[in-house]
Image (spheres, rainbow, N blue to C red):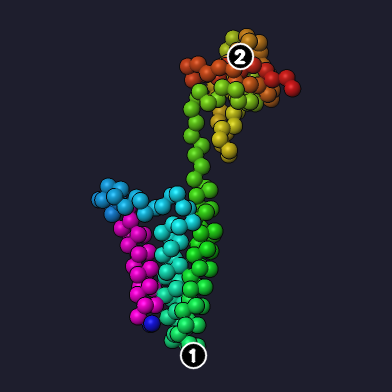
Amino acid sequence: MEGLFIACLAGGILYALISVIFGDILSEALDGVLDFLSMESMSWLQPMTLVGGITAFGGAGLLLTRYTAIGAWAIVLIALLSAVMIGISVYFLYVKPMQNSENSTGFSFQELSGKIAEVLVPIPATGYGEVLVRVGSAGVTNQIAASHDGEPIPSGSKVVVVEVRDHTLYVSKLDL
């Protein structure tokens, strides 16, 4: 039984070392052949979660075998419970937060039509000013703006983007 625990522990440590040190090199050399291992359809079944659980199983089993006097089946059961707990912890404390943090703040100018913005630099009737527009869930962008109606718009006013043309937002004052 000790051999199984040592193999699980050593395999997990070896996987971690290889993936950290050579992960990008191997991925580039194999041209994405192993991308199916990411298992994006089942986010809870990530390699990091599985290998973390296997490593914890080996480590817990090895420690229990060497430092306790309980029976082999009890050791296996406790090691399995430890593996499940560590796997769940890795998923909820590392994998899931990292998936949630992968939000892009990229946007297209055409997406800005219909957005509400705030005037930062006053927009004259026949000139340009600047507006602050919220993009995505956490991003903002400053953009050049002109009056769509030909009326001056003071700083601090709320406006709506009516049209986007030549990287300029044409806005109208928003009266709520």
**Residue 48 marker:** none
Front position in the image: 45 or 90 = 45
Q: Is residue 28 visible?
A: no
Q: Which residue is identified by label 2?
A: 147
Q: Is residue 9 left or right of residue 106?
A: left
Residue 153 falls in which quadrant of the image?
top right
- What residue is rendered at 49% in x and 45% in y? 102
Q: In this view, does 50 lie to the left or right of 23?
A: right
- What residue is rendered at 36% in x and 59% in y? 20
Crowd rating for badge 2 (residues with CA inside 10 Å; few <14, some 14–19, many 20+): many
Q: Residue 15: give x, y in percent of width and height.
A: 35, 64
- What residue is rendered at 46% in x and 52% in y? 42
Q: Is residue 2 visible?
A: yes
Front position in the image: 119 or 11 = 11
Identity, as a three-letter code, of the amino acid under mark 2: Ser
Give the distance between the C-alpha atoms of the residues marked 2 and 1, in whole angstroms. 81 Å
Q: Is residue 53 left or right of residue 162?
A: left
Mark 2 near mark 1, Cβ–Cβ under 8 Å? Answer: no
Q: Is residue 45 above or below residue 110?
A: below
Of tags 2 and 1, which is closer to the observer?
Answer: 1
Task: Please state the extent of the stretch shown in magenta in the rendering.
Answer: 3-24
Residue 29 part of the magenta segment: no
Residue 12 falls in which quadrant of the image?
bottom left
Q: Which residue is identified by label 1?
A: 69
SS for tag 2? strand
